[in-house]
Image (cartoon, rainbow, N blue to C red):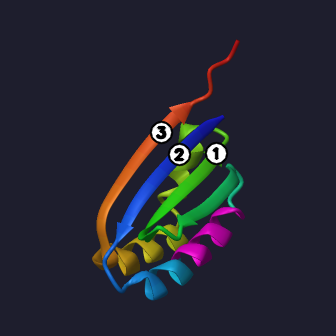
C-alpha cells in the first residue's frame, strides 16, 4: 500500500473554480486500477486550503495516476489557481 497526502493552498477567490475540477479528478482517479481511495477534505476555518488523502496499490500506481489524461488536464487547468502545494508519500510498514 502506498499513501499520498497533498496540502494545497488555493488562491483567494479561486475555490469555486478549483473545487469542481478537483472533484472531477478525484472521481476519475477512483476508476484507475491502482487507486484504492481518493479523499478530498476541507476545513471551514481554512477556506483556501484543501487536503487530499490518496491510497494506491504501490508507488508505480501513483506514477501511473500522474500520467493519465484526466490528471494532466486537471493539473494544467488548476496550476494557475494554486499558491502552494505540498506532496508527501508514505509506504506501509509491514510487520
- Nearest to N terminus: mark 1 or mark 3: 1
What residue appears at the point 47 percent right and 87 percent down from the top-left corner? 16
Inter-mark Cα distance, 3 to 2: 5 Å
Please tell me how crowded label 2 is: few (under 14), some (14-19), or many (20+) other residues with Cα within 10 Å: some
Q: Quadrant of the N terminus?
A: top right
Are discs 3 and 2 less than 8 Å apart at CB?
Answer: yes
Tell me: 64 left or right of 85.
right
Residue at numbered disc 2: 4
What residue appears at the point 53 percent right and 74 percent down from the top-left corner? 22
Are discs 1 and 2 less than 8 Å apart at CB?
Answer: yes
Tag 1 secondary structure: strand
Residue at numbered disc 3: 89
Residue 56 location, quadrant: top right
In the rendered image, residue 32, in percent from the top left (x then y), is placed at 68, 59
Residue 25 belongs to magenta span: yes
Residue 83 belongs to magenta span: no
Tag 3 secondary structure: strand
84 or 32, nearer to the observer: 84
For the image shown, how many numbered marks are present on the structure?
Answer: 3
What residue appears at the point 38 percent right and 77 percent down from the top-left corner? 78
- Nearest to N terminus: mark 3 or mark 2: 2
In the rendered image, residue 58, in percent from the top left (x then y), is placed at 61, 37
Are discs 1 and 3 less than 8 Å apart at CB?
Answer: no
Residue 76 location, quadrant: bottom left
Residue at numbered disc 1: 56
From which residue to which does the magenta span run?
22-31
Inter-mark Cα distance, 1 to 3: 11 Å
Amino acid at each position: 500500500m502506498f499513501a499520498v497526502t497533498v496540502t494545497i493552498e488555493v488562491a483567494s477567490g479561486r475555490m469555486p473554480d478549483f473545487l469542481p475540477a478537483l472533484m472531477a479528478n478525484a472521481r476519475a482517479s477512483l476508476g484507475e486500477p491502482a487507486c484504492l481511495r481518493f479523499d478530498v477534505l476541507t476545513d471551514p476555518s481554512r477556506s483556501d486550503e484543501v487536503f487530499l488523502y490518496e491510497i494506491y496499490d504501490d508507488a508505480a500506481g501513483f506514477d501511473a495516476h500522474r500520467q493519465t489524461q484526466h490528471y494532466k488536464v486537471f493539473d494544467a487547468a488548476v496550476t494557475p489557481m494554486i499558491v502552494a502545494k505540498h506532496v508527501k508519500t508514505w509506504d506501509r510498514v509491514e510487520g
